[in-house]
Structures are given as structure tokens and as C-alpha cells.
């Protein structure tokens, strides 16, 4: 039976509970390597940016915050329900944003950046404990954790995001609140596929069919996505007369 075969494969594979997918295992280090932004560059469509009294304005009336070595200061963004302070030492730029304690609070930072994949990090302070933060990069929502800090500021990666050429807006919301945002940091990055695993099963009694299936899965690794059926295989056979080629089953009973 195909289902027995797949169960054998599941038993044979090394199971790594709690393993973090490679694309979530972003470094928490905020590096500036390889990125030198020019805050004076205006190589976006003319309709996107105008200058008023020396300040770049997007066509949606948002201020365009200069990117300096990939960094945009939060205090220069469009701020809603929050305020700027300078009491906590060692901030970047001219201050940091605090008072993030309401669901309607928002820090909106529009930057002019080359298209590409970037690691996004927040310079922050969170003196009262670990705090969750919600944010949005253009249309893509995200969330992250800001670990507790003492005096001064720290930097936390919140993931990798694709930016379009020209204007991109990063909105930071309350989340758990009671943290301060000093700046956002954008660092060009890439995603590398993990090495293809060896065609070796941990169960040395695995059948030839199991080994064959595992070999097939390894051959697809990194280039194809294989979809299958979670449970209910017998139901599908009963109703359609066809059996899914790949099934997935809960091993809690074994
Ligand atoms: Ca700042």
C-alpha cells in the first residue's frame, strides 16, 4: 500500500521537531556590508517623488526618509499617536520614537530604495521586557520579537522582504506596545538553498520501494514543490475511485 510505504518513509526520516525553516533563520546581526545608499539619489519615476522645502515628498504626500547606509531614522517618518524623545542615550540620528501604546499608533517610513531582497531590522529599545511588534512592508504584513534591553538600543532582524524599485513604505504598529523604535535598517541579502541531503535513511531495514521514494524526493529537493493529501485518502478513493499519489498521516498512534 502506498500509505504503508509513506509511513515507512516518515519513520525512516530523521525528524527534527521544532526545526526552523531556513528562510526564517535570519541572522540577528545588523550588518551594513555591501550596501552604500545615496540619500540624494532620485532615480525613481518622476511621478513618485517631488521635493518641497528640501524634503522629498511621495505622491501620496508621505515624507521620503533618506536611506543612509541602509538606515532610515524612525523619527523622520510620518508619525501617528507617538512622540519623539532623546532621553535614552546612544540613539541614532536625532532621536527615537516612543509612546507606542495604542492600536491606532503608527510609524510610517517611506524610503527610496533599489529593487531587491533585503533583511529588515529595527533599532529599538524595550526596557520593560520582550515585546512583540507588528509591521507591514508595502502590502506584506509581518511580526517579530524585540528582546528586552537595558540602557540604550539594540537591533533585531524581523525577516527578509522584497522591495520594489523606488518608493517602499514600512509601517510599524503597536503589537504588544511599550517599545521604542530608533531606526529601520535595510541590508541587501539573498536566499541560498540548503545543500541537498544524502539519499540515506536512518532505518537500515527500509524497503526498496521506500528507498526509491526517498530518492525521488531528494531528486526534487530545491527545485520542485510536491503536493499531496493530508489524511482522508480512503475517503477520496471511495468518492473518486482515484488514490492520491502522496499522502501524509499523523504518527501519534505509533
Ligand atoms: Ca533615530
Image: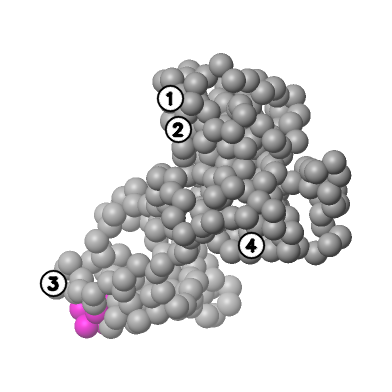
- Disc nearest the viewer among 3 and 4: 4
Instruction: State which quarter of the image contains the C terminus.
Output: bottom left
Residue 139 colored in magenta in the image: no
> Which residue is disc 4 drawn over?
114
Q: How is the image coloured?
A: one colour
The residue drawn where x is 75% and y is 63% is 44
Helix, strand or loop under label 1: loop
Say whether disc 1 or disc 2 marks the residue closer to the N-terminus: 1
Q: Where does residue 119 sit, x and y in percent of width and height?
A: 51, 53
The residue drawn where x is 31% and y is 74% is 196
> Which residue is disc 2 drawn over?
154
Q: Looking at the rendered structure, which numbered label has been put on residue 227?
A: none
Q: Where does residue 216 sit, x and y in percent of width and height?
A: 34, 82
Q: Looking at the rendered structure, which numbered label has been put on residue 204?
A: 3
What residue span does the magenta drawing correspond to?
207-211
The answer to whether the residue bearing label 4 lies less than 8 angstroms from the nearest atom of ligand 1 is no
Question: Label 2: how many residues lie within 10 Å, few (<14), some (14-19) or many (20+)?
Answer: many
Hey, which quadrant is residue 49 in on the image? bottom right
> Which residue is disc 1 drawn over?
149
Q: Is residue 160 visible?
A: no
Helix, strand or loop under label 2: strand
Q: Give the left or right position of residue 77, taking residue 158 as reference.
A: right
- Disc nearest the viewer among 1 and 4: 4
Say whether disc 3 or disc 4 marks the residue closer to the N-terminus: 4
Say whether disc 2 or disc 3 marks the residue closer to the N-terminus: 2
Amino acid at each position: 500500500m502506498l500509505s504503508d510505504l509513506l509511513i515507512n518513509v516518515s519513520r525512516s526520516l530523521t525528524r527534527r521537531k521544532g526545526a526552523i525553516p531556513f528562510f526564517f533563520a535570519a541572522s540577528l546581526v545588523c550588518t551594513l556590508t555591501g550596501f552604500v545608499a545615496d540619500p540624494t539619489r532620485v532615480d525613481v519615476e518622476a511621478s513618485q517623488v517631488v521635493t518641497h522645502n528640501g524634503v522629498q515628498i511621495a505622491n501620496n504626500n508621505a515624507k521620503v526618509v533618506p536611506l543612509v547606509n541602509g538606515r532610515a531614522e524612525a523619527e523622520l517618518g510620518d508619525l501617528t499617536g507617538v512622540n519623539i524623545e532623546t532621553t535614552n542615550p546612544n540613539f541614532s540620528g536625532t532621536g527615537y520614537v516612543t509612546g507606542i501604546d495604542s492600536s491606532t499608533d503608527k510609524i510610517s517610513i517611506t524610503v527610496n530604495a533599489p529593487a531587491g531582497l533585503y533583511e529588515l531590522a529595527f533599532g529599538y529599545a524595550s526596557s520593560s521586557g520582550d515585546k512583540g511588534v507588528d509591521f507591514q512592508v508595502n502590502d506584506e504584513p509581518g511580526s517579530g520579537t524585540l528582546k528586552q534591553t537595558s540602557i540604550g538600543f539594540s537591533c533585531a532582524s524581523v525577516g527578509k522582504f522584497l522591495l520594489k524599485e523606488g518608493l517602499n513604505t514600512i509601517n510599524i504598529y503597536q503589537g504588544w506596545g511599550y517599545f521604542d523604535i530608533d531606526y529601520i535598517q535595510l541590508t541587501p541579502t539573498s536566499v541560498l538553498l540548503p545543500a541537498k541531503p544524502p539519499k540515506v535513511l536512518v532505518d537500515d531495514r527500509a524497503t526498496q520501494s521506500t528507498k526509491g521514494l526517498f530518492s525521488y524526493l531528494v531528486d526534487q529537493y530545491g527545485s520542485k514543490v510536491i503536493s499531496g493529501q493530508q489524511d482522508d485518502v480512503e475517503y477520496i478513493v471511495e468518492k473518486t475511485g482515484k488514490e492520491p499519489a502522496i499522502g501524509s498521516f499523523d504518527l501519534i498512534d505509533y
